[in-house]
Amino acid sequence: MKRKIVNCLLSILVLTCALACKNNQFEDVQLNYSPDRNYPEYLREDSFENDFAGFWRFQKAAPERIAITSDPINPKNQVLRVELRPDERTHGGNRTELVIAEHDSLGYRSTYGFKFMLPDSFFKAEDSNIWFLIHQWHDEPQAGYNWKTNKHKTKPPASLIVQYLKDQGYQLVYVTGLQTGELKEAKVLRSPIELKPNVWYEFANEILWSVYDIDGYSKPSVNGEKFLEYEEPTAYARGRNMYNTEGSYYKFGLYSSGQQKNSRTLYFDDFYIRSKRVGYAPITLD
């Protein structure tokens, strides 16, 4: 029964993510990214005090959709505010996202996290099952192609999703693995944390990027609690998480299935990411 429930969640995500997969072919984001991938490691941090860090790129339908504002819980604190309206599209989809240009590729270990808060207005009822990606790693086409010439439709190799099911309400799930064509390796992990309005949650994750089944993994948690796989806590979601060696780039904010009728606002704070190359060939885990 537990496996059946999770398979049901995965089926819903596969069906509703079809729009996201379809829109990949229209997304040709100019990130001013250098093809030189020989940096050994990097650190990016932003507490969103007064101004944005210089490494962000923005994908938004209007300037005011991404802004630094006072924390609704603690007015002395500055936070990131992201708004998404159902009738607005940019970069091939219904999205308001911040992007980091660096690409993490084969053999990189990425450790990152952020705080997020959903206001009362986020929990509006909808007419159908919907989802919002609040964080994703976006893959790239294989060498020699862009999203207009690439014929392979893919889904993000890692994403954090707020999912609304009419009979269950709002849930937080983490999806990792490859989904393209007949390849369906994605794993859906559910957070045991109950999402409530006006509460700050702290998401943390570690990913080892690999084209190999034996060493790729994710280690997501919220407020220190592990996600559940088949209703059991799991330390690792193992499996390959790269479609090719071009690497993936980091995004967070709001990206919708496009079926919602209401606007949504989300708050973020205390973002960080540390990435370091730890190898090229398959790595033996402790």
Image (cartoon, rainbow, N blue to C red):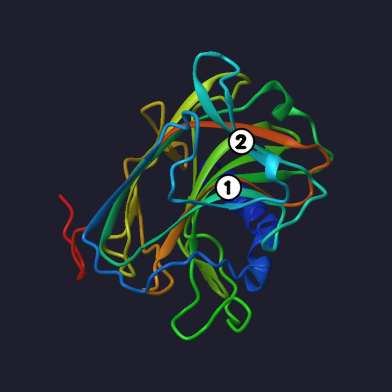
What is the CA distance from the residue labelled 1 to the residue labelled 2?
41 Å
- The number of callouts visible is 2
Question: The disc labelled 1 sits on which kind of residue?
Answer: Lys
**Where is residue 242 shown, x and y percent of the image?**
40, 67
The crowding category of the residue bearing disc 2, from other C-alpha atoms within 10 Å (few below 14, some 14 to 19, many at least 20), is some
Q: Is residue 275 visible?
A: no
Residue 127, percent from left and from top: 84, 40
Residue 228 pos. (x, y %): 44, 38
Vertical placement of residue 119 versus 221, above or below? above
Residue marked by disc 1: 4
Identify the image quadrant of residue 199: top right
What residue lies at 60% left-to-right and 73% top-to-bottom?
153
Location of residue 254 with respect to 99 vertically, above or below: above
x, y percent for residue 32: 47, 67
Q: Amino acid at mark 2?
A: Ala
The label on residue 157 is none
Name the side, left or right, on which 42 lies relative to 94. left
Q: Which of the two residues, 136 or 35, is positioned nearer the viewer here?
A: 35
**The quadrant where residue 23 appears:** bottom right
Q: Are marks 1 and 2 in contact (CB under 8 Å)?
A: no
Which sits earlier in the primary sequence, circle 1 or circle 2? 1
Q: Residues within 10 Å of mark 1 (few under 14, many from 20)?
A: few
The mark lying in front, picked from 1 and 2, is 2
At x 53%, y 41%, the residue is 173
Observer-nearest of 83 and 285: 83
Task: Give the image quarter of residue 85.
Answer: top right
- x 81%, y 37%: residue: 262
The numbered dot on residue 67 is: 2
Residue 277 in view in this figure: yes
Residue at 65%, 44% (x, y): give it: 132
